[in-house]
Image: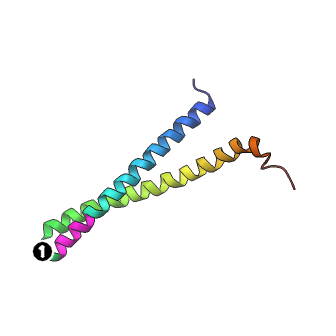
Amino acid sequence: MPDAASLARIQFAFTVELSHYLSDHFNRTRPLSGRLRGLWLKTRDALYLQIYKFWLNVFAMALAFGVVTGIVLSFELASALPIREAGRSGYRPNDRA
């Protein structure tokens, strides 16, 4: 059974990789949806609109999951970094001034 630190590292690695993948997917589907929308506006072909709406849903899901993993990642980084840096700087978050 892995200890808590190993599990935290595995979760962090998973979150970083998922966030990286989803942001890359988000950036790649944006030009595609723009082109499809432009082709629909130019030709008024219903097929382009149908394909555009499909990829718009994929785009929205990638954006939503990317935002969620980014929020989780910011909490993971904020909770891990001050503990690591506290020993070097002498700062203790629970000390009262």
**Quadrant in the rendering for residue 40:** bottom left
Q: Nearer the viewer, residue 8 or 90?
A: 90
* In this rendering, position of residue 89 left or right of residue 15: right
Percent x, y of residue 20: 43, 48
Q: Residue at x 47, y 57 (%)?
A: 67
For residue 69, above or below residue 48:
above
The reply to whether the magenta stretch includes residue 40 is: yes
Q: Is residue 66 left or right of residue 32?
A: right
Above/below status of 57 relative to 8? below
Q: Secondary structure at mark 1?
A: helix
Q: Is residue 2 left or right of residue 57?
A: right
- Residue at 35% of width from left, 58% of height from top? 27
Residue type indicated by callout 1: Thr
- Say which quadrant the C terminus sits in: bottom right
By secondary structure, the bulk of the magenta-drawn segment is best described as helix
Q: Residue at x 12, y 74 (%)?
A: 43
Q: Nearer the viewer, residue 97 or 14?
A: 97
Which part of the image, by quadrant, shows the N terminus?
top right
Q: Which residues are magenta?
A: 33-41
Based on the picture, tell me whether residue 2 belongs to the magenta stretch.
Answer: no
Colour basis: rainbow
Residue furthest top as drawn: 1
Q: Furthest residue to the right?
A: 97
Give the number of marks.
Answer: 1
Q: Residue at x 76, y 41 (%)?
A: 87
- Dot 1 alpha-carbon crowd within 10 angstroms: few under 14, some 14 to 19, many 20 or more: few
User: Where residue 32 sits in the image (x, y, percent)?
Assistant: 25, 62
- Please provide percent x and percent y for residue 77: 60, 48
Residue 60: image location, x then y, percent:
36, 61
Label 1 belongs to which residue?
43
